[in-house]
Image (cartoon, rainbow, N blue to C red):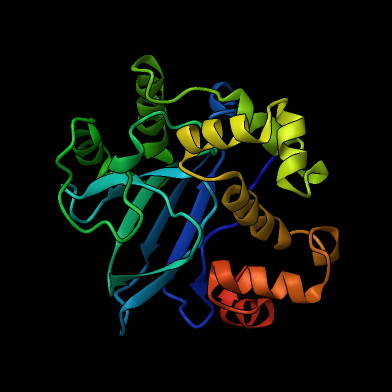
Amino acid sequence: MYSPIQDGIDKSVRSSQYSEVQPPRSLAGLVHCFWELKTITELLDDFHYHALPDACVNILFNQVDTDIAGVTALRTKAEVLNLGKSFHYVGIQFYPGVWQGKQEKIFDSYVGTPYLGSLPLIQVSKNIKDLNFNSKLSALSDLVEWFLKEELIKYNALTAGILEQLDRIHTVADMARIAKLSPRQLQRELKRITGFSPHDFLKVLRVQQSFRRHYLELYADQSHYIHSFRKVTGYTPAKYTAKFDV
């Protein structure tokens, strides 16, 4: 199954901690992971988090200021987020295509303002604020169940099929064939479900795969690989792995 890597954390920063926990089996086709990112002690300098596109949608909770929360997703380029010297975030990462909420309500950059939407994000954030990460998981799972009931998330056969057959997909035409749609139908459906064109969707998934696979299994040659990787991440592969934990 598709498994995006964690976002870029500079190797020089030793006072931050990132954790992931797999969801209960009943939510496995919907949720990739529950995650936490926090400082262990206050940092001397602002922390710059290198967020990578992965086609997933996240529910984000700021556990320092529980009024700040949101639905987030990046598109085709990495974003550098200044989280300051002290922070504590937890979140839910959904597989591509699972989130059914309005695409225009999704943050594609830093979330730093109070949540004003209708989802119960603030109440959940306040309820879990003083719990350790493992103790927060039950409430996060309950929220996912609520999303299911409200039809804000659902298993998506189109994107799930693409992710399951990703090793066989080299072009948008391959994707359309595996999805059993015409290229035009695929364009329309994938855009509606994920906000991505098939070309951009494949570009992001390919870069994510390249962290776990040899690039020649995914790209025509090294030049194509480096160009695609740099366009999405902002770095060449060598400079990225030298700077960030992968």
The residue located at (68%, 81%) in the rendering is 238
The residue located at (33%, 44%) in the rendering is 106
Looking at the picture, how far across and down is residue 54, in whole percent? Answer: 55, 52
Q: How many marks?
A: 0
Q: Looking at the image, which is closer to me, 27 or 55?
A: 55
Q: Is residue 98 above or below residue 209?
A: above
Left or right: where does residue 117 sit relative to residue 181? left
Q: Is residue 83 above or below residue 131?
A: below
Q: Which residue is outermost to the top?
A: 149
Looking at the picture, how far across and down is residue 165, in whole percent? Answer: 77, 36
Looking at the picture, how far across and down is residue 115, in whole percent? Answer: 18, 44
Q: Looking at the image, which is closer to me, 195 or 56?
A: 195
Q: Is residue 172 above or below residue 6?
A: above
Q: Quadrant of the N terminus?
A: top right
Left or right: where does residue 75 sit relative to residue 120? right
- Quarter of the figure with residue 24: top right
The residue located at (38%, 18%) in the rendering is 151
The residue located at (85%, 65%) in the rendering is 216
Looking at the picture, how far across and down is residue 147, in whole percent? Answer: 36, 24
Whether residue 230 appears in this view of the structure is yes
Whether residue 31 appears in this view of the structure is no
Q: Quadrant of the C terminus?
A: bottom right
- Quarter of the figure with residue 241: bottom right
Left or right: where does residue 82 sit relative to residue 158? left
- Quarter of the figure with residue 71: top left
Left or right: where does residue 70 sit relative to residue 208? left
